[in-house]
Image (cartoon, coloured by chain):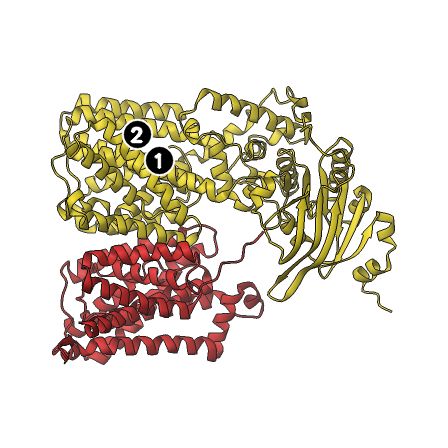
Chain colours: A red, B yellow
Amino acid sequence: MIVQLLVTGIALGSMYGLVALGYHITWVTSRTMNFSQGHAVMAGAVVAFAFYVGLGWPLWAAVLATLVILAALGIGLERVAVRPFFRVASPAWLLSTIACGIIAENVAMLTFGKDARAFPSVLTQKPILVGGAGFYAQELLIPVVGLLLMGGVQLFYHRTGYGKQLKAVAYNPEAAGLMGIHIPRAVMCAYGLSALLAGIAGVLLAPVLNVAATMGTIIGLKAFAVAIIGGLNSAPGIMVAGLGYGLVESFVAGYLSTGAREIIGFALVILVLVVRPWGLLGSRPARRV
Amino acid sequence: MTWVAWGCLAAAAGSLPLFTANTYYLYVAASVGLLTIVTSGLNVLVGFTGQMSLGHAGFYAIGAYAAAVLTTRVGWSGWAAILVAILVAALVGAGVAGAALRVTGPYLAMVTIAFGIIVEGILVEWVSVTGGPGGIFNIPKPSLHAFYWVIMGGAAVSLWLVANLRRSAWGRAFLAVKGSDVAAESLGLSAYYVRIMAFTVSAGFAGAAGGLFALLNGYVSPDSFTLQTSILFLLALLFGGEGRVAGPVAGSIALTLLPEFLTSLADFRLILYGGLLMCSIYWLPTGVVGALTRRGDSDRDRDGDSDSDSDRDGNRDRDGDRDSGGAAPLLQVERASLAFGGVAALSEVTLAVPARGIQAVIGPNGAGKTTLLNALSGFYVPDSGGIRLREVPVAGRPPYAIARLGVARTFQTAQVFGDLSVAENVAVGVAGPRLGSVVAALVGAPWTRAAEARLRRRALALLAEAGLTEWVERPADALPAGLRRRLEIVRALARKPRLLLLDEPAAGLAPAEIAELDAYLARLRDTGGPAVVLVEHHMDLVMAVSDHITVLDYGRVIASGTPEAVRTNPAVIEAYLGVSE
């Protein structure tokens, strides 16, 4: 039982972390974020399903096409719902991204249908049995890919020239702008990358959870909770918080009930914020006087 | 014009039951009423105070379940149940606000979302009280015809309460915190406390609507209280026009009726909502009501008050307990140091400000002058050293607490409350932290109105003295830059401070305006005004009005003395001109 809960917890937690990293990436470059990040996860799963099952493409092609489409959706979202309100001291971007999310959900409902469908995968056909515990190979693949990607994103930011430029924008947009970094393009890239990560999470989760038009909201909210717990401006904090949240959730569901899972998970968020208002590893934004 | 619109609305709501016995129409109209009640309350939080909540369905649920449980299990009457529903929702609201409002932006959004989800989860899980996923069914249901009047009455009362609140000291405090929480704190308002109150009021309104909802339907179940419901509340408010008393009505009508007209498009419901939200963000930033009334606003500009001079002497009644110059300095800074990430902004600054006169602080750019003002007014806390105001240590106290001890200030970029009129800006300063009871403000109690009239008279008198009479009814945003600075000073003086901190009051002023400022400061000093700490670059002004000058360079005091002594001090000349031996 414990092994099973551990595997599930780490698998889901790494995905929450990955999606949450998407919030972080856009937040640090633009002080905005896609509040419908969860719907991007859903879009990833639905689009992959359409190519792989619907059109019968080979898996690699379907995944590739999905990722391209998701990055494009992220960039499009930035254009339509974020850029017009960039750095305006209003929550307009928050509401406009929510609006895009619920529109996306409805479009998915109309095209994909209202019912959940199973995403076939060789990795979920036979459970692996370890001393009475059963789990799917997919559940082992998920955290491996998830953690590799998180590491990759960190490497990109710390080691590559363009990553460093994006980091500079995060640190001080005005100075970065004066140094010749094209800020609107940096924000656009951040949104593309953010949606891409969510799409990957969607593809990875599709075989484990079922694919449904309504799957996005709760994943997005949990990932958001993770980003807030970890601290929006702290990537390491988010990764730790992601795994932690996944484990807590998995064990609460295993030992108490699935109903208690959401209550305890979100109560934990409020508790963390009461104790550490800007997240476990986050820092308070400087007050401007 | 406005009254005609309200009259038509009331007539429409009142005559509907006369024209139709169709319960469906009455039910839809009652739903508009409920949504109006919720969004009126939400308007206090979002529209007035500028905070966001994505969890108000939780308070709606608390009200609904409180009423449902009390009427079914305890056998209370509907009226009593609704009263308790309001109280419980407001109480929970205050608790949630206490936790939520320490943070802002996305963090605040998260807490409110989490609250909504927790409430929804509890409704499903706590079967013995809430009936679980099935909810509570056998709520005694009054006849729809009778209850229609109750709900419409409730909606009308809600609008009236919010209109009263907007005109009160509380309403101005909400808008002040929205406009500039920093400036609000410098006038003695605790932004945290003001926001908690806004959140509590809005939760109470949601609780009332929830209670009415339970009695209207005769059953409640968790499905009615999801995140989507919270988003719908927000959408109705924004579409109608946040910050305007009539906004919630327009938004509630639109958001309730549109889906009813478009029932054939039920599958496109979310696209409809999303599209509406996008449209209102793009094209109606002030909502339907804002777009319709934009013209009307400019017509009202002219009806300035005529009795503005009647209270000219009112502002001379300064506190009798002012220190009369003498021994102990008003403000004493002792070896205060403050570093930002290794850069010393202030190092061992020692400074004494006497109870009278003008003390200038000058120095090259980046010398730490504004940092010093921020430390004096509580926005920064020195890493070491002390600040004492009339012998009371104040370092580490929040800005509003220091403001309440008699310190007022202005800012380098003038921080006026843009959504408030010029007169209201000054009234915020006159009232300071004395806001009275929020319930009295809601119902517009007679003594609140009397206090209002006094506040306004005094604000108008102060504005007249500063030559701003023709602007009193204009929104502060409409003032030209020079007058904004003047308004900021008037607002700060309205607090009757002991100490006034001015941060570059002459920056960006034309030479004629600087001369006026010069005369104004001199008059202030000569008529027994507060002690002034003046941070300024314009040397002519500084030399003309200062009694004492302190010179900062790289966070250190390099000279201190009379204008004459400082002018000839070699260290000062070197700091300014870069002359070295």
Camera-side residue: B112 or A85?
B112
Q: Is residue B206 left or right of residue A257?
A: right
> Where is mark 1, residue-wise?
B40
Camera-side residue: B281 or B498?
B498
> Where is mark 2, residue-wise?
B155
What residue is shown at x 43% (from left), y 67% (from top)? A234
**Whether labels 2 and 1 share one chain:** yes
In the figure, residue B484 lies in which quadrant?
Answer: top right
Camera-side residue: B226 or B116?
B116
In the figure, residue B263 lies in which quadrant?
Answer: top left
Residue B530: image x %, image y %? 71, 36
Of callouts 2 and 1, the N-terminal one: 1
Q: Is residue B304 visible?
A: no
Give, as a three-letter code, the residue at label 2: Ala
CB under 8 Å between discs 2 and 1: yes
Residue B432 badge: none
Can you say which quadrant of the picture contains the N terminus of chain B? top left
In the figure, residue A208 lies in which quadrant?
Answer: bottom left
User: Vertical placement of B121 versus B466: above or below?
Assistant: below
Q: CA distance from mark 2 to mark 1?
A: 9 Å
Name the secondary structure under disc 2.
helix
Can you say which quadrant of the picture contains the C terminus of chain B? bottom right
Q: Chain of mark 1?
A: B
Residue B84: image x %, image y %? 27, 32
Q: Is residue B106 left or right of residue A125?
A: right
Give, as a three-letter code, the residue at label 1: Ser
Q: Is residue B200 left or right of residue A216?
A: right
Q: Is residue B237 visible?
A: yes
